[in-house]
Image (tube, rainbow, N blue to C red):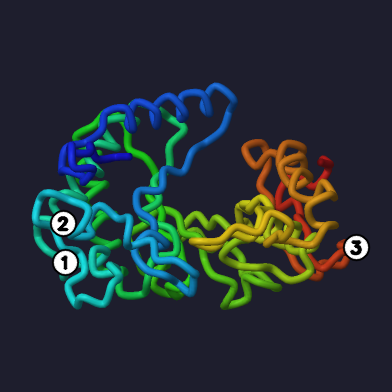
């Protein structure tokens, strides 16, 4: 837990140092293996039911029944707390959230292999609050030795709100072509194409299409069907067997290594005469060399 517990079992506004020590240790270990870590600061699934069997808000520290600080994140008293991810929540809540973000930054700022994500699958009303948090992180990190990329993700937030945001990277939804015919990256944002948010069609081809359009694919492992209050280990939510078993996702980095953009410029291309497939990479300069 990020917050310490009182004797009565309710949380206080004091941080649990073990939580942050464990976070740092895991990021360090990931870095030793060449892995970048997206540090997800907040979780949209922790404040509302989203069609689940149970209600995660019952265990949230900003539920008035779970803290000793007089904090009540459920302003409309409907038994859920999406209000805490808005700028209309109690001022004390935003202050604690900012204090928590500063603590995270202090914990991992000196590490290179860090990305920040404001939150996973946050509700639509959280957009101004997420913009605020992005700017808050950027401002605070200016006083630190390192500055890290900050991301904002969709589902259900629309892609337009992501690309209009001050974020450095975004993870779009499957709309606007990302599910079947990904639009090319235009340089405004680094695009991480997360299969959990896009749910692509023609799964194996989608990885190649995304690669040739300048996107960065992120694969969500299969998992047993989980619902808050229920777990069915025999069922799986995720992707067709051929998408998982074929080395599709592993081939994109292989081609990236074979065709390093640092040594030659490549153009993302569609329907070029020499392309066997619809989507391909074409060398823009040094035509006498081959990948």
Q: Pick the quarter of the image with the C terminus.
A: top right
Circle 1: element type? loop
In the rendered structure, the answer to whether residue 106 lies left or right of residue 111 reads left
Q: Pick the quarter of the image with the N terminus.
A: top left
> Which label lies toward us, 1 or 3?
1
Residue at the spot 43% in from the left edge and 37% down from the top edge: 114
Label 3 sits on residue: 276
Are discs 1 and 2 less than 8 Å apart at CB? yes
Density class for disc 2 (Cα within 10 Å; few <14, some 14-19, many ≥20) is: many
Label 2 sits on residue: 93
Circle 3: element type? loop
The residue nearer to you, when weighing 222 against 131, is: 222
- Mark 3–mark 2 Cα distance, whole angstroms, equals 56 Å
- Mark 1–mark 3 Cα distance, whole angstroms, equals 55 Å
In the rendered structure, the answer to whether residue 25 lies left or right of residue 147 reads right
Q: Position of residue 80 (x, y in %)?
A: 30, 70
Circle 2: element type? helix
Figure quadrant of residue 276: bottom right
Label 1 sits on residue: 89
Residue at the spot 76% in from the left edge and 55% down from the top edge: 282
The residue nearer to you, when weighing 83 against 198, is: 83
């Amino acid at each position: 837990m990020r917050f310490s517990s009182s004797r009565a079992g309710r949380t206080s506004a004091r941080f649990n140092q073990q939580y942050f020590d464990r976070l740092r240790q895991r990021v360090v270990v990931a870095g030793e293996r060449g892995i970048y870590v997206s540090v997800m600061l907040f979780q949209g699934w922790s404040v509302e039911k989203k069609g689940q069997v149970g209600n995660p808000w019952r265990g949230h520290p900003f539920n008035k029944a779970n803290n000793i600080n007089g904090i009540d994140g459920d302003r409309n008293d409907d038994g859920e707390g999406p209000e805490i991810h808005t700028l209309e929540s109690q001022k004390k809540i935003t202050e604690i959230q900012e204090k928590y973000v500063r603590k995270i930054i202090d914990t991992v700022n000196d590490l290179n292999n860090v990305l920040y994500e404001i939150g996973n699958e946050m509700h639509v009303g959280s957009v101004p609050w997420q913009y605020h948090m992005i700017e808050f992180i950027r401002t605070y990190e200016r006083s630190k030795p390192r500055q890290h990329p900050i991301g904002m993700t969709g589902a259900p937030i629309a892609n337009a709100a992501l690309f209009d945001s001050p974020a450095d990277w975004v993870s779009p939804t499957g709309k606007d072509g990302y599910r079947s015919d990904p639009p090319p990256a235009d340089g405004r944002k680094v695009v991480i194409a997360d299969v959990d948010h896009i749910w692509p069609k023609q799964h194996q081809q989608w990885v190649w299409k995304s690669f040739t359009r300048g996107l960065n694919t992120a694969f969500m492992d299969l998992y047993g069907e989980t619902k808050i209050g229920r777990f069915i280990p025999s069922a799986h939510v995720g992707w067709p067997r051929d998408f998982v078993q074929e080395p599709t996702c592993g081939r994109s980095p292989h081609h990236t290594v074979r065709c390093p953009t640092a040594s030659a410029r490549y153009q993302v291309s569609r329907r070029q005469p020499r392309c066997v497939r619809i989507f391909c990479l074409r060398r823009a300069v040094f035509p006498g060399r081959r990948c």
